[in-house]
Structure formats: C-alpha cells, structure tokens
Amino acid sequence: MGGNPLQIQNATCVTYVFKRPNLIRAALTDPISRLAADLRERMRQEDYSLKTPDSIHLATALAHTADEFHTFDPNILRHNGHVALRGLTICKPRGAEQTEIPFG
C-alpha cells in the first residue's frame, strides 16, 4: 500500500488542521456569500485583489465575529488592517515556526 509521499504528507497536514480546537467549520450561507462578494468588490475598487475562496474565508470569519484570522498566505496577510474587514486581525498563528503549509 504505497502512495506518493507528498500526497501522504499533505493529507496528514490537512487532517491535523481540521482537528485543531480553534477551527470552526461553517456552512456557506447566502449572507456569507453576499458578504464575500461585497468584500471582493470593495477590494477591487481600491486596487486590491482578493480571490473568491479567500473572500469566502474572510466573510465567514466576519459573520462568526472572529477576532483573528490565522493564515500563512501572504496574499491574505497583506489585507490586515483594511477597513472592510471591520477590525478583523489577519496574522500568522502564534508560535508558528513554519512559514507555509507544504501543499503540492
């Protein structure tokens, strides 16, 4: 029972992330979808780019009144402090030694 070592490593990483106690699984609702679209449009008007999946993640965090959004993605980290995010702090996880998740 072999397998690509990188695929096994990725699967292990994803399993670990989804078992974290601070991760909330949330449904994509119509209000979250609308908020995500509004975020993308607001960012686009100000010459920022925000990918659809990223806007959905951020809108979900806002809808659930999260204080912080943890990520290693530099494209999301650069939006920290943007007024459209209503005070949501975007940062790397505290104590994180790695700088990225090694997805292949």
Image (cartoon, grey):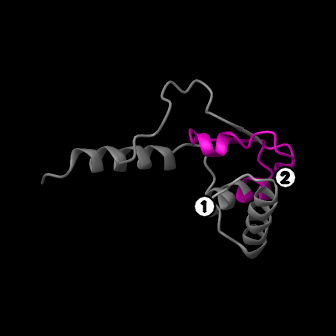
Direction from residue 92 to residue 83 in the image, left or right: right
Quadrant housing the N terminus: bottom left
Kind of residue at disc 2: Ala
At mark 1, the secondary structure is: helix
Q: Kindly identify which residue carries mark 2.
A: 84
Whether residue 68 is situated above or below residue 36 in the rendered picture: above
Q: Which residue is drawn at 81% across and 49% down?
A: 85
Residue 75 x, y percent position in the rendering: 62, 45
Mark 1, residues whose alpha carbon is within 10 Å: few (<14), some, or many (≥20)? few
Direction from residue 3 to residue 51 in the image, left or right: right
* Quadrant hosting residue 32: bottom right
At mark 2, the secondary structure is: helix
Q: Which residue is drawn at 40% across and 40% down?
A: 102
* Residue ranking furthest to the left: 1
Pointer 2 or 1: first along the chain:
1
Kind of residue at disc 1: Pro
- In the drawing, what numbered circle is on residue 53? 1
Mark 2, residues whose alpha carbon is within 10 Å: few (<14), some, or many (≥20)? some
Q: How far apart are marks 2 and 1 (CA)?
A: 17 Å
* Residue extent of the magenta highlight: 59-88
